[in-house]
Image: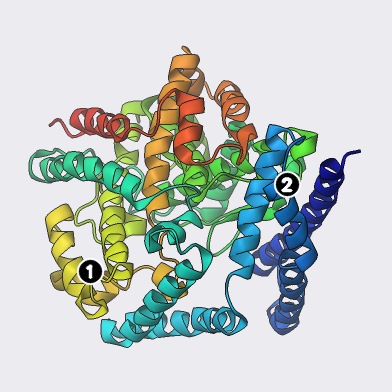
């Protein structure tokens, strides 16, 4: 065995240990959200803290640093996958060790302080109570970015944590095109559209136990592997667990709106299928190359199933008989798949709250947040001016008057992200939505009978195609554009997403 090969095997052992410990951490987190008895939270807090300390020590171990430095300087003899592992682990090590202890401690404390300040500010609908926290996060983010990679623009370093290899310049290009296409479509739907009838699925009581049972059937039909995961109910739906061999997915249900539980469950199933599908090659297991490429790519997998599949016409043929069996008094036998499709696809005005918005208006909620957070870290927007800028952009992009509809609480204070310093996260939602449309288009080209299969409830061809073309690629590519090129033949193209929305809603809203 050569020195390089030997060093690499030592590195791989260390990285697999870290991965296993992170799996345990994921399991503790799932347990806390789903199972933990109310009297156990203090002891659980201590267990989590102790484990986090062990993981931190392993990730910042100088011996690991030495190994990485040696392999990063000379990787001759390593194959391509091994080189990717070295590159990714090296980057993770730099991130883990770049910050001095006092800054790391301040960040941990500010996450808690920021959360409480945000809750109080939102309760009072008073942004001025939150502004000092946001100012500190902006200052910390600048300092953090300069320590991690002083050669890069601040926003790029922040973005890279969530969307590997993405740059602000590229997002400007993508979101610029999106804004030009989406703002007039939204205005058109609002002024000229005829909304489908949504009453079939809202405003009456859908038993939540029956909803949970139905969603379990759907998750299994879509391909969730119950021998490598669990389905449970939690207050905030999420997908977690230890990794590909044990994916813990949770959902929640609202009695008065069956669409929320349904689309939420299908969304989380999409995340789960990606997780279960990324563990294919034994020599990748537990190593950085096997991980999800980015938050945006992860979101592309949840949104592909939620929007491209579940909000499509063919899916309503599969869903309708199931809804009629589960809710015979609420979904009459005379209902047509077309009526169900219409009810599933309402554009909701005013579009005030991001998480409650539909697929058409959602994108502009994200563009607005991106423009503001980037302006903040670049010093072009002052913290005290954020609410005024927010409200003006809401009028311009979404024709929504925040001041008249509830002020700061329903405007600038609606999301938790900035309170935890997550600057650079928002763009991943909409990048994911655009990727989903483009990936689905490629799947349609590769699987000529895809619509018919979906209508019949045969989802295996699509799931297998995603497994083989996307899930198993993990983090092998350097960024989402490279992955998109490998999967769809071209870099992310916002026009595919825009045509999808234009065609669908021109037809639905009779524009
Ligand atoms: Zn998601």
Q: Vertically, is 344 above or below 425?
A: above
Residue at screen point 13% across, 71% down: 404
The crowding category of the residue bearing disc 1, from other C-alpha atoms within 10 Å (few below 14, some 14 to 19, many at least 20), is: few
Element at badge 1? loop
Element at badge 2? loop
Q: Is residue 340 left or right of residue 250?
A: left
The quarter of the displayed image where residue 254 is located? bottom left
Q: CA distance from mark 1 to mark 2?
A: 40 Å
| Residue labelled with disc 2 | 287
- The quadrant of the rendering that contains the N terminus is top right
Q: Is residue 84 visible?
A: yes
| Residue labelled with disc 1 | 380
Residue at screen point 44% across, 27% down: 440
Q: Residue 285 versus residue 114: which sits nearer the camera?
A: 285
Percent from the top left, x then y, of residue 430? Answer: 36, 47
Percent from the top left, x then y, of residue 129? Answer: 32, 87
Q: Is residue 164 left or right of residue 491?
A: right
Q: Is residue 290 visible?
A: no
N-terminal of the pair, mark 1 or mark 2, is 2
């Amino acid at each position: 065995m050569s020195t390089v090969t030997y060093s690499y095997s030592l590195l791989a052992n260390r990285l697999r240990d870290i991965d296993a410990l992170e799996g345990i951490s994921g399991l503790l987190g799932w347990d806390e959200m789903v199972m933990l008895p109310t009297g156990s939270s203090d002891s659980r807090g201590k267990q989590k803290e102790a484990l986090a300390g062990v993981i931190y020590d392993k990730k910042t171990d100088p011996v690991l640093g030495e190994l990485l430095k040696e392999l990063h300087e000379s990787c001759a003899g390593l194959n391509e996958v091994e080189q990717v592992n070295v590159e990714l682990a090296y980057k993770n090590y730099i991130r883990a060790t770049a910050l001095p202890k006092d800054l790391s401690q301040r960040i941990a404390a500010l996450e808690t302080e920021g959360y409480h300040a945000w809750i109080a500010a939102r309760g009072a609908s008073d942004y001025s109570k939150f502004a000092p926290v946001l100012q500190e996060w902006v200052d910390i983010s600048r300092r953090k970015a300069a320590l991690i990679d002083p050669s890069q623009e601040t926003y790029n370093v922040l973005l890279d944590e969530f969307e590997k290899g993405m740059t602000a310049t590229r997002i400007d290009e993508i979101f610029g095109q999106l804004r030009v296409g989406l703002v007039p479509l939204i205005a058109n739907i609002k002024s000229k559209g005829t909304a489908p009838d949504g009453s079939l699925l809202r405003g009456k009581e859908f038993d939540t136990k029956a909803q949970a049972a139905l969603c379990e059937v759907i998750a299994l039909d879509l391909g969730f592997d119950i021998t490598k995961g669990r389905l449970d109910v939690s207050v905030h739906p999420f997908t977690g667990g230890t990794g590909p061999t044990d994916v813990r997915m949770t959902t929640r249900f609202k009695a008065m709106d069956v669409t929320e539980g349904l689309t939420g469950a299908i969304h989380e199933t999409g995340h789960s299928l990606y997780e279960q599908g990324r563990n294919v090659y034994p020599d990748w297991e537990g190593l950085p190359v096997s991980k999800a490429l980015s938050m945006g790519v992860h979101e592309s997998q949840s949104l592909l199933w939620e929007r491209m599949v579940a909000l499509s016409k063919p899916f309503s043929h599969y869903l309708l008989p199931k809804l009629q069996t589960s809710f015979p008094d609420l979904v009459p036998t005379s209902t047509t798949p077309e009526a169900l499709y219409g009810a599933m696809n309402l554009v909701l005005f005013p579009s005030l709250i991001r998480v409650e918005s539909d697929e058409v208006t959602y994108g502009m909620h994200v563009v607005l947040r991106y423009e503001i957070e980037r302006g903040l870290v670049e010093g072009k927007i002052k913290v005290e001016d954020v609410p005024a800028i927010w409200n003006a952009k809401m009028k311009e992009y979404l024709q929504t008057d925040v001041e008249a509809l509830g002020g700061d609480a329903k405007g600038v204070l609606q999301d938790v992200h900035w309170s935890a310093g997550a600057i650079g996260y928002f763009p991943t939602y909409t990048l994911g939505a655009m990727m989903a449309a483009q990936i689905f288009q490629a799947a349609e080209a590769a699987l000529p009978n895809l619509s018919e299969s979906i209508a019949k409830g045969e989802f295996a061809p699509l799931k297998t195609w995603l497994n083989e073309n996307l899930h198993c690629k993990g983090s092998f590519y350097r960024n989402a554009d490279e992955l998109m090129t490998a999967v769809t033949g071209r870099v992310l193209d916002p026009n595919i997403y825009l045509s999808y929305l234009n065609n669908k809603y021109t037809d639905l809203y009779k524009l």
